[in-house]
């Protein structure tokens, strides 16, 4: 028998299950017969794989369809780039219980050391300033207590010090939406942020600007009941929020992608790659999923665990409607572009400044990572949001050349010291088309509620359906929620 929610929690007994047959998809060369499963999961990232594992453990026959030839979604280890950098997810926070439990269950080793980078030098209008000189620099136009905060600290300081929530679910309440479902710009103005501080914050945004980013969405992402992070964030800690959290975070040994690969290996032949879904058709107790190559899959339920940018390209019958359709079609996705470089001389020793660089120009950050053996011979330059989209207009070769010339212009000691080793843009990934979705200001709670509501036989997972957590943990949490919904309906 298949287990319902209560039975699944109390036992892990596995049993066989029946499947349904659905109607044919017209227009392309169809497989003679459809493969049959209890549940088809679309997407082999953390959310889809976690849902599939829970369903398999409860006795359901599951098929996972992954559009690319790679497992992991936005957990992407750059094995093709020297140094194997993390192109997406990389930091496992101490509160990521589901991720940690899965790693332990599958024998995937975790270690400390994610996001260990050299401190920042700052470039404002093309002029350099050391972080220890920032508070008194003439380039620092912020006012009052803001002057003591580095540009990399401003956002996290405003968020953590003005966090109105005592737990991670309060953001989902109507009262919270009424007070905080406004733009980040409005919220910062309400707090008395200076125009200069708002300008610096806007330079590092993933969202297009302060007026499209949602204060409620950003406040949701603050770790709570986590005293170590709060203590670090409320002090004047060098670096950005990722580096602050790195003090107590972990990484997957060998690369973040190794964990979803282990999850897929546990599922075995249930995971099928190079299966881009074109259509989901539901009729009564049946669902049929059709891929671009013509293969068909019959099931009782479907779980969509792909980014909304991908879901928008799938035909769904019956159609999505109302708030749910609006949320799927209108939730914006941002871009991040990375330029990876090898360093052939210690330029920071030549100019006496810290090796990483924050800029208000076309590049957001240039980070110098400390490797796990202590070496520091690689850099990554990254641009986010509109800056990334602007940079992506250049072909890869010219993009790398532009970034190196820009760094050399800002920091002459780097002339002749840098060589591009790899380029990655999330907007250029066909089955992602962006690095992350952000619920928009004014519609944050309405979209958050709509995106988790099952549609006929279709359930939704993915980081965009976050409830309590962020990052990899929110993806795992969402897959768990989708599986539990199916248990309840079986």
Image: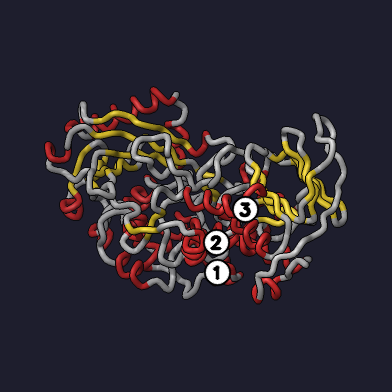
Drawn side of residue 79 relative to residue 347, left or right: right
The N terminus is located in which quarter?
bottom right
Drawn side of residue 224 relative to residue 482, left or right: left
Name the element at disc 1.
helix
Q: Is residue 110 visible?
A: yes
Q: Residues within 10 Å of mark 3 (few under 14, many from 20)?
A: some
Name the element at disc 3.
helix
Q: Looking at the image, how many numbered discs can be counted on the residues?
A: 3
Cα gap from disc 3 to disc 1, whole angstroms: 40 Å
Instruction: Locate residue 31, reporting x and y percent.
Output: 81, 35
Q: Which numbered marker is on residue 85?
A: none
Which of the marked residues, 2 or 3, is nearer the chain's N terminus?
Answer: 2
Cα gap from disc 2 to disc 3, whole angstroms: 40 Å
Is residue 423 depicted above or below 167 in this figure? Answer: above
Is residue 90 depicted above or below 82 in this figure? Answer: below
Q: Are marks 2 and 1 in contact (CB under 8 Å)?
A: yes
Q: Which numbered marker is on residue 176?
A: 1
* Image quarter of residue 403: top left
Is residue 329 depicted above or below 102 in this figure? Answer: above
Instruction: Locate residue 85, reporting x and y percent.
Output: 38, 42
Instruction: Locate residue 335, reporting x and y percent.
Output: 48, 41
Instruction: Locate residue 439, reporting x and y percent.
Output: 56, 54
Name the element at disc 2.
loop
């Amino acid at each position: 028998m298949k287990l319902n929610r209560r039975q699944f929690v109390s036992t892990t007994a596995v049993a066989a299950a029946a499947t349904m047959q659905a109607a044919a998809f017209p227009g392309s060369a169809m497989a003679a017969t459809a493969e049959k499963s209890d549940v088809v999961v679309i997407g082999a990232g953390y959310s889809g794989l976690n849902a599939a594992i829970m369903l398999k453990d409860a006795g359901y026959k599951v098929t996972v369809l992954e559009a690319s030839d790679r497992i992991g979604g936005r957990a992407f280890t750059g094995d093709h780039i020297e140094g194997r950098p993390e192109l997406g997810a990389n930091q496992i926070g101490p509160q990521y219980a589901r991720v940690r439990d899965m790693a332990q269950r599958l024998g995937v080793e975790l270690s400390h050391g994610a996001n260990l980078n050299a401190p920042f030098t700052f470039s404002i209008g093309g002029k350099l300033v050391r972080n220890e000189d920032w508070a008194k620099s003439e380039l620092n136009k912020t006012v009052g207590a803001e002057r003591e905060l580095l540009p990399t600290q401003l956002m996290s300081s405003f968020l953590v010090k003005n966090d109105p929530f005592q737990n991670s679910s309060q953001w989902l309440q109507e009262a919270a939406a009424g007070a905080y479902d406004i733009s980040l710009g409005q919220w910062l103005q309400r707090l008395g942020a200076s125009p200069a501080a708002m300008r610096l914050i806007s330079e590092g945004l993933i969202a297009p600007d302060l007026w499209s980013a949602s204060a409620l969405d950003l406040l949701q992402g603050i770790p709570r009941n986590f005293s170590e992070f709060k203590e670090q964030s409320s002090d004047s800690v060098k670096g950005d929020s990722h580096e602050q959290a790195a003090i107590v975070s972990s990484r997957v040994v060998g690369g973040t992608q190794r964990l979803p690969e282990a999850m897929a290996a546990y599922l075995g032949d249930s995971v099928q790659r190079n299966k881009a879904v074109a259509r989901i058709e539901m009729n009564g107790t049946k669902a049929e999923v059709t891929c671009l190559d013509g293969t068909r899959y019959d099931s009782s339920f479907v779980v969509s665990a792909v980014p909304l940018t991908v879901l928008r390209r799938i035909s769904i019958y019956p159609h999505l409607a109302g708030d749910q359709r609006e949320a799927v079609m209108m939730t914006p996705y941002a871009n991040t572009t990375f330029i990876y470089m090898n360093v052939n001389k210690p330029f920071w020793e030549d100019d006496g400044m810290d090796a990483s660089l924050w800029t208000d120009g076309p590049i957001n950050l240039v980070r110098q990572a400390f490797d796990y053996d202590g070496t520091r011979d690689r850099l990554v330059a990254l641009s986010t949001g509109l800056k990334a989209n602007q940079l992506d207009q250049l072909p890869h070769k010219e993009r790398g050349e532009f970034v190196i010339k820009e760094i050399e212009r800002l920091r002459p000691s780097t002339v002749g010291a840098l060589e591009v080793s790899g380029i990655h843009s999330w907007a250029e990934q066909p089955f992602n088309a962006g690095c992350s979705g952000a619920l928009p200001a004014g519609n944050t709670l309405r979209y958050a509620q709509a995106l988790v509501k099952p549609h006929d036989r279709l359930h939704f997972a993915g980081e965009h359906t976050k409830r309590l957590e962020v990052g990899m943990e929110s993806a795992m949490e969402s897959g768990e929620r989708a599986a539990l919904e199916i248990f309840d309906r079986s």
